[in-house]
Image (cartoon, helix red, strand yellow):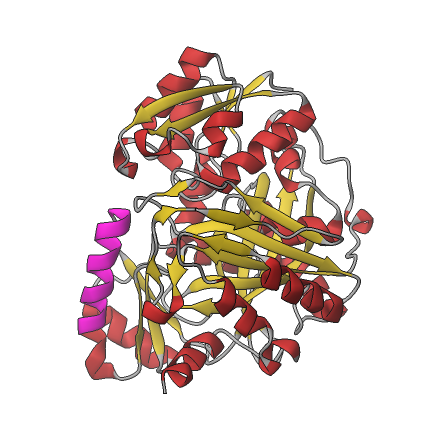
Amino acid sequence: MFKKILIANRGEIAVRIIRACRELGIRCVAVYSTADRNALHAQIADEAVCIGPAATKDSYLNMNAIIQAALNTGAEAIHPGFGFLSENAEFARLCEKNRIVFIGPSYKSIEMLGDKAAAKETMAAAGVPVIPGSKGAVKSVEEAKEVAEKAGYPILVKASAGGGGRGIRRVDKPEELEAQIIAAQQEAKNFFGDDSVYIEKFLINPHHVEIQIIADMHGNTVYLGERDCSMQRRNQKVIEECPSPVVNEELRARMGQAAVAAAKQSGYYNAGTIEFLVDGNRDFYFMEMNTRIQVEHPITEEVTGFDLVKAQIKVAAGEELGIKQEDIRLNGHAIECRINAENPELDFRPSPGTIESLYIPGGPGIRIDSAVYQGYTITPYYDSMISKLIAHGANRDEAIMKMKWALSEFIVEGVDTNIDFQLELIKRPEFKDGDYDNGFLNRYMEMRKK
């Protein structure tokens, strides 16, 4: 087992990893930008190293500065968390070059699965159902038109190196295709440095369901149930729940087995998530694979009792999983609300500022993953998520009730938040009945404006 790990991230995920290290008896090194000098992760780590100015490109995306910090502090491994460099194959390769363990999959797996078009081909080879569309990145508008006609409109133009809802355009008519390809390519180039795009059929109002897997380096792979992430706005997840209200035992087994086959096909190890779209007939299609820990991993932990972050570290150290598929049991239901410093009434405009007063709810079945405290200043430089509120109950109804009172008790003063908006969504009859899909929140927001 490692003696010291460097955490190449910030905020609540950095704090989450530090706590896992504490439980494993591992010393941890935090890195921080000048804007995060007073951040919680920098204060509670055993060591903290400033790696640059506030801008992410000069700090949390500065690969050389992070590697140097690991070398200077004697860290044997780096945990990238999520976002930033977590799915960067070049960074994983740089870690290997400097004999530092990257706590995640191999750079080869990241390269293979990070390119969404190539990942689709890999999944098809593993026998995993894929959405109809191009076999890889389209090389011309003419090729795109042929693929779109064959798949049938509406279609999506998607960035091959995309993620986080970036580089995606819906096209309903042939005459819109060329302009949307250009728009998607420009956004993809700006955010990912890669303007290649692919085409896939747009499934109308499906559920977004993802399967969590964990695999070791000894050929053992298990899936830990599913998470429903359909409550999303502009391709950004807002509320997640585990298990999904639309998945039964038979479908869970089929999706889980497909996810394990996908991982084995790509020689994958460590934690990963295979994301699927599930239509009204309960047919499912591969969408993409995230080669990292997910923001919403706590709800899986609550329902399975399995610590994913500690498992990541153990797998990276070469240990076997120590569990088999039959050992995995789903206990109750869990819901996660992402608490953001933003104003829903002003088109979710970010709300930086100082937290003047803070009350965090607690009690049976309530978990908070956060890095904010009273007097903490939320800067404008990073993602607006400040906390994750998780409610775990014996069943879905109980989890919803716990989430209602937890949101009602959550107080943050000094900045705007989406807490009241989250409570509004949890109270909606569509959510209570599990009668929502990928497009629900966008439709609801349009209705809300009227």
Residue 298: where, in percent of width, then height? 63, 49
Residue 341: where, in percent of width, then height? 41, 55
Magenta stretch, main secondary structure class? helix
Residue 108: where, in percent of width, then height? 44, 37
Residue 184 shown in magenta: yes
Q: Is residue 76 above or below residue 206?
A: above
Residue 42: where, in percent of width, then height? 46, 27
- Judged left or right of residue 83, residue 389 is right
Q: Do we see residue 366 in this rendering?
A: yes
Q: As rendered, which of 271 and 84 lies closer to the eye?
A: 84
Q: Residue at x 36, y 82 (%)?
A: 449
Rendering quarter of residue 318: top right
- Judged left or right of residue 320, residue 417 is left
Residue 176 shown in magenta: no
Range of the magenta residues? 179-193
Question: Where does the C terminus fall, quadrant-wise?
Answer: bottom left
Q: Check the image and name the residue furthest to the bottom.
A: 450
Q: Do we see residue 295 in this rendering?
A: no
Q: Residue at x 49, y 26 (%)?
A: 43
Q: Residue at x 63, y 32 (%)?
A: 20
Q: Is residue 233 above or below residue 381?
A: below
Q: Residue at x 49, y 34 (%)?
A: 106
- Judged left or right of residue 354, residue 188 is left
Q: Is residue 343 above or below residue 378?
A: below
